[in-house]
Image (cartoon, rainbow, N blue to C red):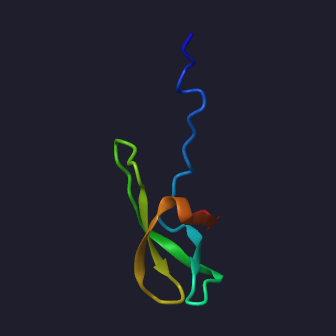
Amino acid sequence: MDESTNSNFKLRPELKLGDIVKIMRYDYTAYNVAAYGIVVRAERLIQIPMFPTVEVLMFDQKLVETFPASVVTVISRA
């Protein structure tokens, strides 16, 4: 008998505008470096995108960058 597909399907918590997030990056020496920022745009679509992205204003660089939602960790909710 076929198992229900909805029972094991879990989504990541949604990222909202104003969430403070941490992104792990690699510097030129290949060491893991934590970077912090605030979410300025999160995609909210009717369908679930295959590779959801989020735009983050980076505190250290003062630039808006786009990251895959899977590499962003929420530190503080808005």
Residue 27 found in image quarter: bottom right
> What residue sits 42% from the left and 55% below the top?
52
Q: Position of residue 76 (x, y in %)?
A: 64, 67
Q: Residue furthest top?
A: 1
Q: Quadrant of the C terminus?
A: bottom right
Of the pair 61 and 8, the residue shown nearer to us:
8
Furthest-left residue in this view:
46
**Which residue is at the front of the view, 50 or 76?**
50
Residue at 55% of width from left, 20% of height from top?
Answer: 4
Residue 16, visible in the rendered structure: no
Closer to the camera, 40 or 55? 55
The image shows residue 47 at horizontal and vertical percentages of 35, 42
Q: Give x and y (percent) for residue 16.
A: 49, 60
> Could you say where residue 24 lies in the image, as x and y percent from the top left?
60, 74
Residue 25, can we see it? Answer: yes
Looking at the image, is 74 positioned above or below residue 7? below
The answer to which image quadrant residue 21 occupies is: bottom right
Q: Is residue 14 above or below residue 36?
A: above
**The N terminus is located in which quarter?**
top right
In the figure, is residue 53 to the left or right of 70? Answer: left
- Count of marks overlaid on the render: 0
Residue under the point 52% across and 52% down: 14
Observer-nearest residue: 4 or 38? Answer: 4
Q: Is residue 28 above or below residue 26?
A: below
Residue at 40%, 79% in the rendered image: 64
